Image (cartoon, rainbow, N blue to C red):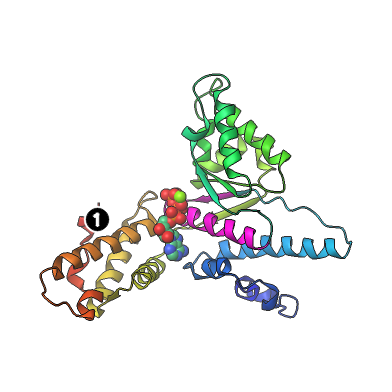
């Protein structure tokens, strides 16, 4: 990732943010390759730059502040939260913030137990698994639902304690819908201050969804015909017009692409000696109608 690419235009003093300052690692390239997500990339550049600079300051015996890197990812399903978290783990590993950089995805059922003591035990187990990497808590607000006697709160306090104790080698990310996540943080004032970095994942527009589709085809060695391009564009524009928050954003696109690849297979299976072109090309008739995508 080049800092210059993610900074707002006004502030591009490239002599300060020389692209060479950023390690050229695969993990950065992977983040850069994701379609859209400009704000996400910018915030992560900020966080990464801060950490790298603190390291350099320490080397010169200047005051350095430990970065608190626990984060909140807010956004609808399929906007890339898990994908970005996974790449971020690798970035933090590459720049020496996390010793392993793996991602452990957990949800309420992985943390909350059924009797007294069970929750702390389950939560500690997941924390142990996450050490050196990222603990990614999906739909974190579900830990707060279930009333006063619910064990969800015990899971939260166990996690917070561990965040304080092992500050150096664990990043916790709370993920979920924007409004529920906000409400959850409001009702836990102590929690908000421990998660200083908030990142919003916006819904993708039609053009971005189209670019995501092209990227998936190309990763899999497929190409699409011109007619298919038009049909796909229209399909995705219509999808954006009619969608609701749960429609799945990029996940919908991935499913659409996969379905078209299966339909193409069905179309060419009886060709005796399929050419390279036969095997590669997705035609408009391979693309399912919107009605065939539920
Ligand atoms: N910006 C992007 N560029 C390319 N592919 C993307 C992008 N965002 C998401 N995808 C793809 O879309 C799919 C869904 O993304 P992901 O699982 O990260 O979403 P999510 O926000 O975690 O959703 P959920 O809340 O449902 O867990 C993945 O297969 C991912 O590869
Ligand atoms: Mg996810």
Q: Position of residue 88 (x, y in %)?
A: 58, 58
| Residue range highlighted in magenta | 72-95
* Residue that protrudes farthest toward the right in the picture: 61
Question: Residue at 65% of width from left, 48% of height from top?
Answer: 70
Q: In this figure, which residue is indicated by the disc labeled 1?
A: 293
Question: Residue at 30% of width from left, 71% of height from top?
Answer: 233
Is 113 in front, or is 132?
132
In this picture, residue 169 sits left or right of residue 129: right
Can residue 25 be seen here? The reply is yes
Secondary structure found at label 1: helix
CB at disc 1 and ligand 1 closer than 8 Å: no
Magenta run includes residue 89: yes
Q: Position of residue 141 (x, y in %)?
A: 52, 37
For the N terminus, which image quadrant? bottom right
Can residue 204 be seen here? The reply is no
Give the class, few, some or many, for how many residues have Cα within 10 Å of label 1's Cα (few <14, many ≥20). few
Magenta run includes residue 117: no
Question: Residue at 60% of width from left, 39% of height from top?
Answer: 127
């Amino acid at each position: 990732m080049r800092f210059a690419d993610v900074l707002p235009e006004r502030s591009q003093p490239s002599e300060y943010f020389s692209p060479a300052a950023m390690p050229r690692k695969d993990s950065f390239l992977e983040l850069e390759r994701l379609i859209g997500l400009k704000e996400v990339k910018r915030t992560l550049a900020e966080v990464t730059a801060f950490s790298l600079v603190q390291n350099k300051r320490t080397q010169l015996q200047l005051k350095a502040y430990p970065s608190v890197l626990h984060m909140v990812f807010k956004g609808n399903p399929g906007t890339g939260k898990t994908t970005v978290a996974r790449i971020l783990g690798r970035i933090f590993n590459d720049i020496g913030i996390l010793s392993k950089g793996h991602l452990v995805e957990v949800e309420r059922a992985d943390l909350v137990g059924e009797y007294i003591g069970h929750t702390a035990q389950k939560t500690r187990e997941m924390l142990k698994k996450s050490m050196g990497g990222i603990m990614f808590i999906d739909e974190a607000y579900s830990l707060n639902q279930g009333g006063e006697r619910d064990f969800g709160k015990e899971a939260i306090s166990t996690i917070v304690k561990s965040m304080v104790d092992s500050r150096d080698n664990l990043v916790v990310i709370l993920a979920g819908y924007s409004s529920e996540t906000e409400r959850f943080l409001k009702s836990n004032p102590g929690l908000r201050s421990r998660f200083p970095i908030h990142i919003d994942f916006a819904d993708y527009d039609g053009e971005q969804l189209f670019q995501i589709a092209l990227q998936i085809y190309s990763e899999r060695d497929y190409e699409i015909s011109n007619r298919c391009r038009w049909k796909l564009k229209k399909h995705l524009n219509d999808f954006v017009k009619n969608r609701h928050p749960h429609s799945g954003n990029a996940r919908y696109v991935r499913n659409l692409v996969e379905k078209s690849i299966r339909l193409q297979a069905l179309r060419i299976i009886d060709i005796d000696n399929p050419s390279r072109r036969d095997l590669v090309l997705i035609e408009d008739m391979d693309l399912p109608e919107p009605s065939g995508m539920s």
